[in-house]
Image (spheres, coloured by chain):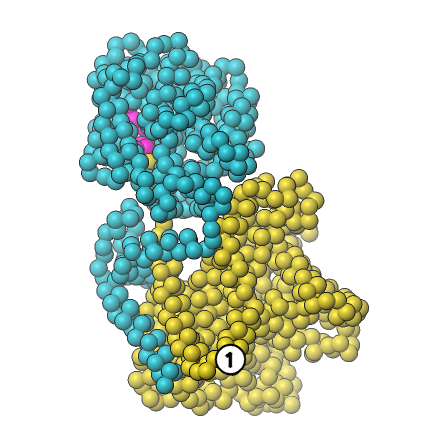
């Protein structure tokens, strides 16, 4: 008797789930959890059939339109919690492939980096874990040296340490490699024409303030402000006092590290993204390589119409963007950067007539030509320290030197 | 297509079961199975299905010739031809790149190396058809006269892609007459669901975990974490492979086929010899019956035979030297055990015997995992404290604590403990058997639900998010 029950239950499950998902490959839903355009069925032709693409696409369609998919995804992430227990101070290590790794070796669209990154969840905050990579620590400054030699203008380097560096419990330094050491090692390789900017000290002094996000790998605009002060004072200028800025905030932000881990420990305490509006007039244009479009330095659409609130800063990453300001001092700076700079650059608007911004992962022009054509006077390389966990990033710099 | 996918579980399988059981005619049922099997294979390899059909067709004729001209030179010729064709197929599609790069290396030349994408299952179906022609030659089975029945044997999707290597003589009767009963179907479901759980719940999780240790830069490892990492791989590969075999056996039983067991709790073995009687049994017995014994077994050229068999066993697993090393590693151990080590081992307490086996298995898996021998050597050095890596780090404590329940659970399920406890329960409890029966149904439901959840969860790709 029980055998028949077993059989009936099994058949019931596979048939019911099968029938309710029958329409999966015909209907296409848009998925709110991810942005992707590759979910269309390929044309049913011989080439697609014989290469197996048609079947693969069928598989993908079936699974991406599976009933209750979003709920099941969240549920499966909950299963992670029953695999074990937290250690000590509510510590949990989550590993993820391809997290925020801009890797010259893996530029192909949609190819996930195979590098593992570790994220530490400590209490209600998530932080990326730093690791030592001898090759990258050398390649990065050497590439910058070569660019400096080619373009011959004032060159600055800012490496921004992250939250995990300033945690007091010594276990953190056991888990995460010293970013202070990383910065010092990188600086030691610079030619004397390259000026490293120290933001470590100021961030350390302000570490008890809300300078890093809990659910995202970025710093807050407040943290970026302190770095801006350090930068501008190193150049011998006077920083704008923070009270001079009008602010706009958005709460309820669950950022990149939440999306990667879906940890319920951090979703209980979302971030507040605060933007400091520039006090001078600005126009902002971005180029995707062929077309220019207009935007805003602080783009409030990302507060109103999007969940990607960090995108409020410069509207996210683009290959090339240019800010022109009402500041009439003939100073033009080029910032070559990762997304940390996005929160930082709005503060520079009070000091430069033009700010040119290049994302080396996407920019495809010859850097010497660009600098000469646009009469750039200074260049700032701004990345977070963790960019040198992996090889390949400096390859993007090299590409800019040799591009046609 | 793979068994542990949503489209198989909720598309292919229900459709297959529906058509098979609605139609009562045995011949039509065979045709349905053939069509579904070929579709199953074509789904993943649309082009290489031609190779599968070619191999099946040519050995169908080989078999008929051997049977018809039994005792004559023609029969022997047909056997040799079958061996030649099958091994050539394997040689070209699996080993040609390997062969060419080795020739280039040895002779310091630069011949073009053409790497073929390995057609799925080729290592299995060539061996299956080879075993058929051998068995026909030896007179252990009559040649199958019906082409479609032979094609069914070769292409049957249950064991086509990942084994067990099913010998024709084991299912010859069932191809002609098989019955499907509630008992068999019930058993089949249980085996299938267990296999699904092993693969999706345990193997996939262990694999993701092990990758953090084996694929990250080694300067982040400690001695302890290196052992932990490779033990996770040991769990992954066992649950993956034995899970697949369970699913194959389960599916077969649902349709009335009885395949032999392929795994028997290998990690409770007490020696390398014992291990290979429990691991990938269908492969070990293939090499024993078709290579070792024909070459003379332990009667003639014993040492040479062992070396050849283990060289081939290693090589079968992949076209790289590390697999050969892995095979030879076990070959040497088995020889040493035969010569004197076994006698010492049995005198030791059981715990030490088990520990011995676990240590050598983990060393073996390290050889198996790294196709790059320099990485392999580095990893082994870390394992044995011959590197600058610390014994243990804070990171390890966190990683271990974060996964402790899973790890213990996986280790327990890799042994017969749960089965033994269940059996004890039955004898002690008043309605023990009924309890067990309904526990099994609950277990099945839980495994299926959890597996669906995890399979859907796996499809989530957060990489697409990083544009900011």
Q: Secondary structure at mark 1?
A: helix
Residue extending furthest toward the right? B340
Chain that is cyan in the image:
A
Of residues B374 and B234, the one drawn nearer to the viewer in this rendering: B234
Q: Is residue A321 magenta?
A: yes
The residue drawn where x is 42% and y is 82% is B434
Q: Label 1: how many residues lie within 10 Å, few (<14), some (14-19) or many (20+)? A: few
The residue drawn where x is 27% and y is 21% is A323
How far from the left and from the top, in percent, is residue B436? 44, 78
Query: Which chain letter goes with mark 1?
Result: B
Q: In terms of secondary structure, what is the magenta stretch mainly?
A: loop
How far from the left and from the top, in percent, is residue A91? 46, 43
How far from the left and from the top, in percent, is residue B36? 37, 75
Residue A272, compared with residue B8, is above or below; it is above
| Residue B453 visible in the snapshot | yes
| Left-right relation of B207 to A299 | right
| Left-right relation of B4 to B332 | left
Of residues A22 and B153, the one drawn nearer to the viewer in this rendering: A22
* Quadrant, the C terminus of chain B: top left
Residue holding disc 1: B428
| Residue B45 visible in the snapshot | no
Magenta residues span A315-322
Residue A120, compared with residue B181, is above or below; it is above
Residue B211, compared with residue B261, is above or below; it is above
Of residues A388 and B96, the one drawn nearer to the viewer in this rendering: A388
Q: Is residue A195 magenta?
A: no
Chain that is yellow in the image:
B
The residue drawn where x is 23% and y is 64% is A23
* Quadrant, the N terminus of chain B: bottom left
How far from the left and from the top, in percent, is residue B458? 38, 56
């Amino acid at each position: 008797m029980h055998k028949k029950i077993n059989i009936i239950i099994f058949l019931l499950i596979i048939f019911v789930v099968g029938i309710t998902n029958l329409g999966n490959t015909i209907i296409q839903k848009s998925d709110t959890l991810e942005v992707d355009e590759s979910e269309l069925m390929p044309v049913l032709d011989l080439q697609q059939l014989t290469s197996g693409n048609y079947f693969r696409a069928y598989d993908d369609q079936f699974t991406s339109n599976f009933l209750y998919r979003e709920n099941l995804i969240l549920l499966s992430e909950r299963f992670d919690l029953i695999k074990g227990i937290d250690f000590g101070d509510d510590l949990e290590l989550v590993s993820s492939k391809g997290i925020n790794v801009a890797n010259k070796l893996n530029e192909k669209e949609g190819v996930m980096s195979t590098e593992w990154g570790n994220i530490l969840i400590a209490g209600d905050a998530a932080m990326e874990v730093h690791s030592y990579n001898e090759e990258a620590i050398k390649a990065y400054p050497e590439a910058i040296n070569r660019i400096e030699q080619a373009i011959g203008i004032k060159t600055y380097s800012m490496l921004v340490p992250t939250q995990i560096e300033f945690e007091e419990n010594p276990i953190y330094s056991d888990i995460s490699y010293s970013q202070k050491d990383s910065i010092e090692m990188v600086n030691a390789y610079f030619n004397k024409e390259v000026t490293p900017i120290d933001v470590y000290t100021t961030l350390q002094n302000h570490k008890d303030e809300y300078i890093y996000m809990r659910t995202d790998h970025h710093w807050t605009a407040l943290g970026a402000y302190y770095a801006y002060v350090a930068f501008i004072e190193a150049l011998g200028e006077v920083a704008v006092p923070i009270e001079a800025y009008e602010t706009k905030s958005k709460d309820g932000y669950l950022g990149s590290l939440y999306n990667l881990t879906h940890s319920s420990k951090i979703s209980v305490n979302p971030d507040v993204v605060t933007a400091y509006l520039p006090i001078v007039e600005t126009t902002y244009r971005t180029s995707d390589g062929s077309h220019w479009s207009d935007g805003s330095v602080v783009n409030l659409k990302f507060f109103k119409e999007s969940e990607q609130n960090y995108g409020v800063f410069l509207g996210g990453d683009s290959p090339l963007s240019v800010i022109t300001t009402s500041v009439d001092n003939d100073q033009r700076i080029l910032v070559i950067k990762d997304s940390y700079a996005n929160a930082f650059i709005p503060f520079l608007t009070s000091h430069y007539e033009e700010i040119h911004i290049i994302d080396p992962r996407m920019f495809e022009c010859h850097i010497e030509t660009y600098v000469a054509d646009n009469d750039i006077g200074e260049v700032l390389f701004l990345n977070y320290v963790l960019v040198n966990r992996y090889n390949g990033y400096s390859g993007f710099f090299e590409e800019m030197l040799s591009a046609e | 297509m793979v068994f542990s996918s949503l489209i198989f579980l909720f598309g292919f399988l229900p459709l297959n079961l529906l058509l098979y059981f609605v139609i009562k005619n045995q011949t039509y049922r065979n045709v349905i199975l053939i069509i579904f099997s070929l579709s199953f294979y074509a789904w993943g390899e649309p082009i290489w299905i031609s190779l599968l059909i070619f191999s099946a067709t040519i050995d169908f004729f080989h078999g008929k010739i051997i049977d018809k001209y039994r005792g004559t030179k023609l029969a022997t010729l047909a056997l040799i031809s079958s061996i030649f064709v099958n091994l050539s197929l394997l040689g070209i599609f699996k080993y040609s790149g390997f062969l060419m790069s080795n020739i280039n290396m040895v002779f310091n030349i630069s011949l073009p190396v053409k790497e073929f994408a390995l057609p799925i299952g080729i290592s299995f179906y060539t061996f299956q058809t080879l075993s058929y022609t051998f068995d026909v030659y030896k007179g252990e089975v009559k040649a199958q006269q019906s082409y479609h029945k032979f094609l069914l044997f070769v292409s049957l999707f249950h064991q086509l892609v990942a084994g067990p290597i099913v010998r024709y003589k084991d299912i010859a009767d069932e191809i002609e007459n098989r019955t499907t009963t509630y008992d068999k179907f019930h058993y089949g479901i249980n085996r299938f669901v267990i296999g699904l759980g092993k693969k999706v719940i345990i193997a996939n999780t262990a694999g993701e975990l092990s990758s953090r240790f084996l694929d990250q830069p080694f300067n982040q490892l400690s001695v302890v974490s290196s052992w932990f990492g490779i033990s996770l791989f040991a769990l992954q590969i066992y649950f993956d492979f034995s899970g697949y075999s369970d699913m194959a056996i389960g599916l077969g039983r649902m349709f009335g086929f009885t395949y032999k067991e392929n795994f028997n709790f290998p990690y409770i073995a007490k020696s390398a010899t014992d291990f290979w009687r429990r691991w990938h049994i269908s492969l070990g017995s293939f090499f024993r019956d078709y290579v070792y014994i024909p070459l003379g077994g332990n009667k003639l050229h014993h040492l040479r035979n062992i070396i050849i068999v283990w060289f081939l066993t290693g090589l079968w697993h992949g076209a790289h030297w590390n697999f050969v090393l892995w095979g030879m590693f076990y070959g040497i151990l088995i020889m040493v055990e035969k010569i004197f080590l076994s006698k010492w081992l049995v005198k030791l307490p059981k715990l030490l015997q088990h520990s011995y086996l676990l240590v050598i298995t983990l060393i073996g898996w390290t050889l198996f995992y790294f196709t790059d021998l320099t990485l392999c050597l580095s990893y082994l050095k870390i394992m044995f404290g011959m590197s600058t890596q610390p014994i243990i780090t804070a990171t390890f404590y966190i990683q271990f604590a974060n996964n402790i329940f899973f790890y213990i659970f996986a280790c327990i399920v890799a042994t017969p403990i749960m089965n033994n406890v269940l059996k004890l329960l039955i004898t002690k409890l008043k309605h023990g058997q009924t309890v067990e029966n309904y526990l099994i149904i609950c277990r099945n439901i839980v495994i299926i639900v959890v597996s669906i959840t995890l399979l859907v969860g796996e499809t989530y790709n957060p990489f697409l998010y990083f544009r900011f």
